[in-house]
Image (cartoon, grey):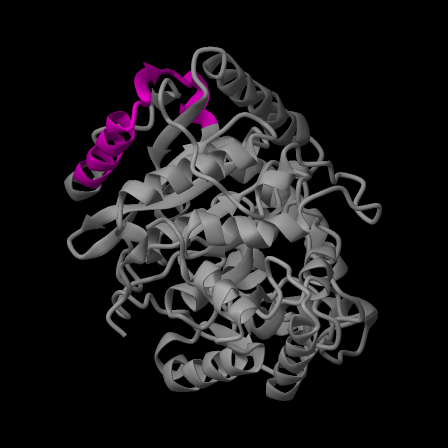
């Protein structure tokens, strides 16, 4: 019961009942039919996808087997796929095309995965809703009047809508986990460094991570297995222990597993329907033998402030390179200063401008110590809270979001309300921990996610626990009414 379409398709490819070319044709055809409604992709190259599929079929015919051989995949548009546009959801990129592959993209392609699209996203991965793309908003397949979550909106919707069984997003403070929760998809933010960031457009470098998404934990593990590990092109990358267990993921034995429930996360602000779904999901874990215990993460109250001080500061630094001088769009002007100012003013959208200005202020003379340096100290305290909790429990279970997906425009006029949507997802990012969003049920007909957080480098255990949960439930198998 715990497997998803990727596992079934891989078995069909191995048996010769399916071909990679057929699966690629089906993916492209489904996008042709649904993209007018969902707007989840920004680039497709039909011929390139079919060439990759035919090459995969040749490898299959030779008897080669791999967890991702012949499987359609989608890449978020901040990942470099050589020859394809890299828009980052922004006008300022001006038709820039990737001169090389991101490491995670290269590893998937070498394993025989078939790329079928680049996915829409909030501009430069800044957003919690999928509303901040220069190419228009992506829509939630469960209810197109609602947001899909962001910033990896297109990647998650591509999987939820059946374009591909596996996609890559990125997660800085919740950017795959929040849309995963809103769209009934399994989404992982790995331990910082486990997936190479080479070839991923930097937004907030100390927080950014590539985030794989799929229909189930078992499907997600298949793609994760061929990408994880140290990369000489990324000095922050590290080895993942027990990675050999990913390709044939088995459910964990939950007997005696200690799961902590942080009291700061189960608050009165959670919507009643979301709380009911989470309680039912936790009861399933308890019925399988897990021991549930309350724990405390006392510095959680400072998490949103800390996250957005660090995020905006690093954004202002990283996005300084987009000035019209070397690549991307350029707006002509009489002076160099005028050209740079006009290029950035017309190229960046409102959320990107907001964060650049806030970050520049936080890093300015006289405010660096008061804001950025204090945020770094608080980040250390938040990480220590987790370390203390993991002395008592094996992993943590929390909500992903206080509510389900909201309607378009409900929060976009109030940036603070939008930022607070990340209140449960930014803390593991600040502590560099692995965190997984797992479909946990429905509230008012909309999906609800359960977040599992593990100690550093326990990514494989998180997926094995999620696989055990999905063996006992069917939430992840329910499909949107498309």
Name the residue located 56 percent from the left edge and 45 percent from the top edge.
172
Of 369 and 26, the residue lying toward us: 26
**Residue at the location (40% across, 25% down)?**
301
**Residue 252 rendering spot, x and y as whole percentages:** 43, 32
Q: Is residue 79 above or below residue 305?
A: below
Residue 335 appears left or right of 303: right
Question: Residue visible at 24% across and 47% down?
Answer: 441
Magenta range is 276-302
* Secondary structure mainly formed by the magenta segment: helix
Residue 416, image quadrant: top left
On screen, residue 177 above or below 72: above
Report if residue 469 is visible in the image: yes
Residue 361 x %, y %: 62, 42
Q: In the picture shown, does residue 108 fall above or below 192?
A: below
Q: Is residue 286 magenta?
A: yes
Q: Is 270 within the magenta?
A: no
Q: Residue at x 51, y 43 (%)?
A: 249
């Amino acid at each position: 019961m715990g497997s998803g379409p990727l596992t079934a398709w891989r078995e069909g490819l191995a048996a010769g009942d399916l071909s990679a070319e057929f699966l690629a044709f089906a993916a492209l055809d489904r996008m042709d039919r649904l993209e007018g409604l969902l707007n989840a992709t920004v680039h497709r190259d039909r011929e390139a996808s079919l060439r990759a599929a035919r090459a995969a079929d040749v490898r299959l015919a030779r008897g080669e087997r791999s967890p991702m051989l012949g499987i359609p995949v989608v890449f978020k548009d901040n990942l470099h796929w050589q020859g394809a546009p890299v828009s980052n959801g922004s006008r300022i990129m001006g038709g820039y095309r990737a001169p090389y592959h991101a490491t995670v993209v290269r590893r998937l392609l070498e394993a025989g995965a078939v790329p079928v699209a680049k996915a829409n996203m909030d501009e430069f991965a800044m957003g919690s809703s999928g509303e901040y793309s220069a190419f228009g908003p992506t829509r939630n397949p469960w209810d197109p009047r609602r947001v899909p979550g962001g910033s990896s909106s297109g990647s998650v919707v591509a999987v939820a809508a059946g374009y591909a069984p596996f996609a890559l997003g990125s997660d800085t403070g919740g950017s795959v986990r929040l849309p995963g929760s809103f769209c009934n998809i399994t989404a992982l933010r790995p331990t910082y460094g486990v997936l190479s960031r080479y070839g991923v457009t930097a937004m907030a470098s100390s927080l950014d991570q590539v985030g794989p998404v799929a229909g189930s934990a078992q499907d997600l593990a298949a793609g994760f297995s061929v990408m994880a590990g140290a990369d000489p092109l990324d000095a922050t990358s590290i080895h993942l222990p027990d990675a050999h267990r990913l390709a044939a993921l088995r459910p964990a034995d939950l007997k005696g597993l200690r799961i902590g429930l942080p009291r700061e996360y189960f608050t009165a602000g959670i919507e009643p329907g979301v709380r009911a779904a989470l309680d039912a999901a936790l009861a399933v874990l308890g019925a399988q033998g897990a021991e549930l215990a309350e724990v405390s993460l006392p510095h959680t109250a400072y998490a949103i402030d800390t996250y957005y001080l660090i995020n905006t500061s690093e954004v202002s630094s990283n996005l300084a390179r987009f000035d019209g001088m070397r690549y991307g769009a350029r707006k002509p002007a009489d002076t160099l200063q005028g050209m740079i100012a006009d290029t950035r003013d017309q190229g960046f959208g409102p959320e990107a401008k907001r964060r650049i200005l806030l970050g520049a202020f936080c890093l300015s003379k006289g405010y660096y110590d008061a804001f950025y340096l204090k945020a770094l100290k608080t980040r250390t305290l938040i990480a220590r809270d987790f370390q203390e909790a993991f002395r008592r429990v094996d992993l943590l279970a929390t909500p992903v979001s206080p509510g389900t997906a909201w309607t378009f425009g409900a929060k976009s006029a109030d940036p603070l309300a939008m930022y607070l949507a990340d209140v449960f997802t930014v803390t593991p990012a600040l502590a560099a921990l692995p965190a997984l969003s797992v479909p946990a049920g429905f509230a008012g007909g909309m999906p609800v996610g359960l977040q599992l957080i593990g100690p550093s480098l326990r990514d494989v255990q998180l997926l094995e626990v999620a696989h055990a949960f999905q063996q006992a439930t069917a939430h992840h198998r329910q499909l949107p009414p498309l």
